[in-house]
Image: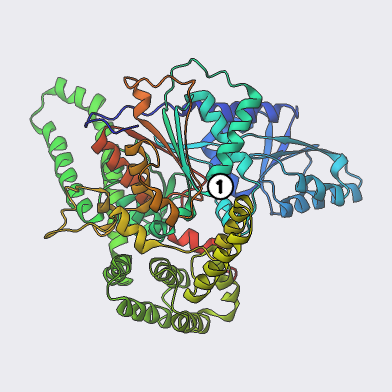
Amino acid sequence: MAFAGRRDAPEAPDFGILKRLARDQLIYLLEQLPGKKDLFIEADLMSPLDRIANVSILKQHEVDKLYKVESRPAPSSSDQFCFLVRPRIRTMRYIADIVNADKMSGRSRKYKIIFSPQKFYACEMVLEEEGVFGDVTCDEWSFYLLPLDEDIISMELPEFFRDYFLEGDHRWINSIARALQLLNSLYGPFGKVYGIGRCAKMSYELWRDLEEESEGDSQGRKPEIGNIFLMDRDTDYVTALCSQVVYEGLVDDTFRIKCGSVDFGPDVTSSDKSIKVLLNAQDKVFSQIRNEHFSSVFGFLSQKSRNLQAQYDRRRGMDIKQMKNFVSQELKGLKQEHRLLSLHIGACESIMKKKTKQDFQEMIKAEHSLLEGFDIRESTSFIEEHIDRQVSPTESLRLMCLLSLTENGLVPKDYRSLKTQYLQSYGPEHLLTFHNLKRMGLLTEQSAGETLTAVESKVSKLVTDRAAGKITDAFNSLARKSNFRAISKKLGLIPRVDGEYDLKMPRDMAYVFSGAYVPLSCKIIEQVLERRGWLGLEEVVRLLNGNEFSVSDSAVEDNPAWESQRVVLAVFLGGCTFSEMAALRFLGRERGCKFIFLTTAITNSARMMEATIEAKA
């Protein structure tokens, strides 16, 4: 899709159908157990379930009591138990304990396990080992996709990141392929598919196999999404580890946005209770500030409050008829907007307080130095001080990883020194964490990488090309080299700015990091879409460890007049940050196209670090 001249971006397709499909399938599965039943729900399925089917819908289909998995159920008079769970071994043991306890006490019930999004063979093995496989019926709720907003779809699989990138576990690839198949059948056929990363390639190939098996019926239909771009998170760890400074990203870093909503505590609400707020395009205030740099948010909110006050003041000179119209048509909307405005002002104040306490400016300065490759010694001293002051174990790790990634690994002396200081500050149990980070290529020593590449080149001369490819893959996973400096130079990720960078009127995607850095993931997407493939990016691909692909579906008519040609589905495998979304939305506005985001889960630097930490700090 060569970018056209600037036009208004097309509308996003209606993803409401995904919710309706998920709801209908769940109701169908519940009704297969007729009569009253108790429902046990896994904790991390509660929020997604709430977005699909609330308690009243469940009650309509004869769900009597609701329990959280892991809590011991009170003695229940119900003759039917239904478990809505993720396919996890510990959950299978929990269910087996309940079934066996009933058997011991001579209680007879029906048990149904509904796995979401799919069941794994290992789960059935555990049920068999525990001697309850014959007592339960198993089903799958193919709930792969949850629309969080008009342009964000999440698979709500936060464990995917650790499972795939750390443990090397491929079991979720099937879920990704099925999710792509579903989207292709509803909004496709996708004309062009681009991607980079091993997981992206495997997911694409499995999806293609599924399409061939099902002989998709989407041929000949006018597509709503024309292009799709798949990207592994390990293609660009740096962007995910940077502090976010766009409003939505800061809200996520400070309060944790969970499943599209956030809990604002008493410090935001200026009352003694917390409020749960849904953050999406329907929130008129939020939709206008979500992608803005934090420095321009206060000005916008104060202007908005003045406008709101002016609208309220209009009623002063009204006669009875006008007043009646005002009350019936406008007042409710103004009150709602006023409530949201005061919440977002409260959130901004709370963020300011917390960030001032944490020396946020100093931290951003150190990050920018790392990204640009200046004053590395000074930044290393900042990180050491951060560790010694025991500010936060996740923050200290994040800065160390950022230093390692931008410098292509740490000098052995620095690596040992930082590691020793970290273990002394936060506890020796974090030794395993360092092992995990090394395995993922997030925190590495320089020398090991160089010797491996030497060995790798010698070995590859002795074996066939295909075997060499496999060996290269193995070496890559042993010592993933982050060629950040070289890539940054090739793609111009650090903008050269004369004078001040205007954050209120941004001119490129770098504004999401205060004008200091264009997110690598977004730059790759921009370049590939512009060139309609990887031609001319061979050097960048080599530095990113390859696994790129670009496929056109010859059966899909390439009609440039179709709106779908300007709709791009950006798929992030391993998580996507709100900063990346803001950058691509900006690019879409500039180039007259619409980006839709599909991600295994929303991520940020803290979530990424927590996934690698062994000792729960």
On the image, the x and y values in percent for residue 609 come to: 49, 64
424 shown above or below 238: below
> Is 509 left or right of 402, judged from the image as shown?
left
For image coordinates 31% across by 41% down, the residue present is: 585
Residue 49, visible in the rendered structure: no
In what element is the residue under mark 1?
helix
For image coordinates 33% across by 42% down, the residue present is: 526
As drawn, the residue found furthest toward the front would be 462
**439, 383: nearer the viewer:** 439
Position of the C terminus, as image quadrant, is: bottom right
As drawn, the residue found furthest toward the top would be 220
On the image, the x and y values in percent for residue 99 come to: 83, 47
Quadrant in the picture for residue 13: top left
**53, 440: nearer the viewer:** 440
Position of the N terminus, as image quadrant, is: top left
For image coordinates 51% across by 29% down, the residue present is: 183
For image coordinates 62% across by 50% down, the residue present is: 466
* Three-letter code for the amino acid on which mark 1 is drawn: Cys
Residue 213, visible in the rendered structure: yes
On the image, the x and y values in percent for residue 156 come to: 54, 45
**315, 156: nearer the viewer:** 156
Mark 1: few/some/many CA within 10 Å (<14, 14-19, 20+): many
Q: Which residue is mark 1?
A: 199
**33, 160: nearer the viewer:** 160
On the image, the x and y values in percent for residue 234 come to: 48, 55
